[in-house]
Amino acid sequence: MSSLKATDKRIAKRRQVYKTILSNPFVNEEHIWPHVSNQQLVIELLQKYVLNKLQHLIEMNVDKSQWPFTIMTDFNKIYKYISSSDLPTYDNKMILFVCNKDPDVPSVMLQQIPLLTSMSQKEIILVQLPKGTLTLLQKYIELPYGMLLLPTNQFDPIFVNQIQEQVSKQNLAWLKPLKYKHTDIKLVKSSAPLITKNKETKTKK
Amino acid sequence: MNRIQREKFRDRNMRQKYDLLHIKSTLNTPALSGLYLKNFYNAAKRYDLTLPSEIVDSDLKFCGNCGVVHVPLYNTDISSTIEGTKEMFKMVCKKCQYEAIFENPRIESAKVVRSKSNSPTLTATLTPKSTVTPSLTSNKINKNKAKDRAKKRKNNSLNNLLANKKKEQNNGSSSSLSSLTLESFMKK
């Protein structure tokens, strides 16, 4: 029989760890938000190409309808824009900035955004912003949902490319089959060899 | 089965159930998804696993009525309305028309009245150093406060009070010692 001290030692040797049970590349829930490699650069780009221009426009009191670019911040509008299928092709690419680390942004909505962007027929670059960006952005523009959608065709292509380089691609394997409709094909027209003696006919499906 | 094998089995089992939940939505058999979801929850209970709130919370990841995984644009419609100081998110399951409504406090609109003197400071806050330093200093202040409070607490504890008194008595020269004598006591 081992002494109490020995058992105590044996137990103490084990440490408590937390293992991820549900994580796997199929559902890929931990990487549901695409990785941003250089967050500081992304913010600087955003500041240079978007926020500074916004500031000028607001200072000059230019009406929102006459801005040289469109900016969407309302959730319903963004949802509609992303889900609509009748946009011209040049409007198909967009960048969606989301302050997903800030505590004020509703988590219910945040959970659905990565799914939304990967389900969309359009090319959406989803960019997560670091913590505290919401207050920075709100100095320039009101963000009622912590989201900022920019259609790329109205912005400098350098800006778009540089942002795209920083963001990894979304990879949610389980959503891929959902993007396409099921085919209704049951029979495919094909050809079969002519019957020779007693051999059974082979029909290709 | 020994312990390691048992854990491996559990992990594999849970992972498979979780994957099945997600595949279900692609197979066009929504009637079964509720069953699979219940099976998954039961397994989690049996293995004594605490699932994160994103999975467990009702109506959040899975539809509260039919149990299908919410996938916007495919089987769920999301809309938002603002009512006073609250945001209402409505998720409608397209399979069973079940509506789930979430309330959130609205993000405060911090519309800053920008003056010209204000603008340079705004741009300055962008550099990494300046964003880091305020948080650090605020941390320091907090830490100091906490330390002070801890010191006070220590000083106030009974043991310390007694120790202090003893010190005083030891240092406090003969006067305090003499006070023990009857005469000095009478004098007082």
Image (cartoon, rainbow, N blue to C red):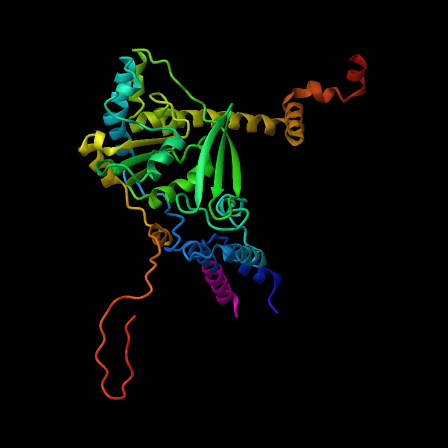
Residue B3 part of the magenta-drawn span: yes
Report the label total. 0
- In this view, A138 is above or below A102: above
The residue drawn where x is 58% and y is 62% is A7
Q: Nearer the viewer, residue A12 or B20?
A: B20
Q: Position of residue A103 (x, y in %)?
A: 45, 32
* Helix, strand or loop: magenta stretch: helix
Q: Position of residue B157 (x, y in %)?
A: 64, 29
Q: Quadrant of residue B26?
A: bottom left
Residue B169 part of the magenta-drawn span: no
Image position of B156 (left or right of A139): right
Image position of A32 (left or right of A55): right
Q: Position of residue A155 (x, y in %)?
A: 21, 30
Q: Nearer the viewer, residue B133 or B19?
A: B19
- Quarter of the image where the N terminus of chain A is located: bottom right
The residue drawn where x is 60% and y is 27% is B155
The residue at the far bottom in this view is A197
Question: Does the image show residue A129?
Answer: no
- Quarter of the image where the C terminus of chain A is located: bottom left
Q: Position of residue B54 (x, y in %)?
A: 49, 44
Range drawn in magenta: B1-16
Image position of B127 (left or right of B36): left
Q: Nearer the viewer, residue A142 or A186?
A: A186
Question: Does the image show residue B124?
Answer: yes
